[in-house]
Image (cartoon, grey):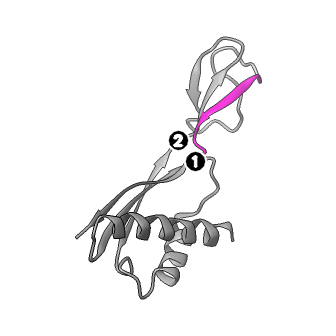
């Protein structure tokens, strides 16, 4: 359900920048979503089709790029991604003292207009 608010914010940002650039139509949005963000592509698309109706972004295509979760171990300083492992243990030293350094993203990377 939080995708509705995110999508409304996405539209607001898109229209603000498209209008400032003198766009007549928004053709495409490139959206980056991190593995840990809990944002579902299909939900964003569903809400986009609803909230963008009757705007210059109504027919815009949404392209989603997924970013894997990455971590840094506090014990050995190794950086790693999950690569299918079921836990957050450092694969180098098995420490549980890790921090998330990537994968929480949800951002509008670029907008294509005409």
State yes or no: discs 1 and 2 in contact (Cβ < 8 Å).
yes
Q: Residues within 10 Å of mark 1 (few under 14, many from 20)?
A: some
Q: Does dot 1 land on a helix, a strand or a loop?
A: loop
Per the rendered image, the range of residues in magenta is 96-104
Determine whether, in the image, residue 75 is placed left or right of residue 37: right
Q: Nearer the viewer, residue 85 or 67?
A: 67
Q: Is residue 97 magenta?
A: yes
**47 part of magenta stretch:** no
Which residue lies most toward the right here? 96
Residue name at image x 63 percent, y 16 percent: 92
Q: Position of residue 48 (x, y in %)?
A: 49, 76
Residue at the spot of label 1:
35
Establish if 44 lies above or below 98.
Answer: below
Q: Label 2 belongs to which residue?
A: 68
Return the x and y of residue 42 as percentages of the image width and height.
52, 70
Q: Is residue 25 left or right of 84 when viewed as pictured?
A: left
Identify the residue at the far top of this view.
Answer: 76
State the quadrant of the N terminus. Answer: bottom right
Gap in Å between the C-alphas at discs 1 and 2? 5 Å
Residue 6: give x, y in percent of width and height: 59, 65
Q: Nearer the viewer, residue 41 or 9?
A: 9
């Amino acid at each position: 359900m939080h995708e509705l608010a995110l999508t409304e914010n996405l539209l607001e940002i898109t229209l603000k920048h498209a209008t400032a650039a003198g766009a007549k139509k928004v053709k495409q949005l490139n959206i980056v979503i991190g593995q840990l963000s809990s944002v579902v592509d299909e939900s964003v698309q569903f809400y986009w089709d609803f909230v963008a109706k009757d705007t210059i972004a109504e027919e815009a295509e949404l392209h989603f790029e997924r970013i894997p979760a990455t971590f840094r171990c506090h014990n050995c300083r190794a950086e790693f991604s999950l690569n299918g492992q079921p836990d957050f243990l450092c694969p180098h030293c098995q420490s549980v003292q890790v921090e998330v350094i990537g994968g929480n993203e949800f951002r509008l990377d670029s907008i294509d207009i005409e």
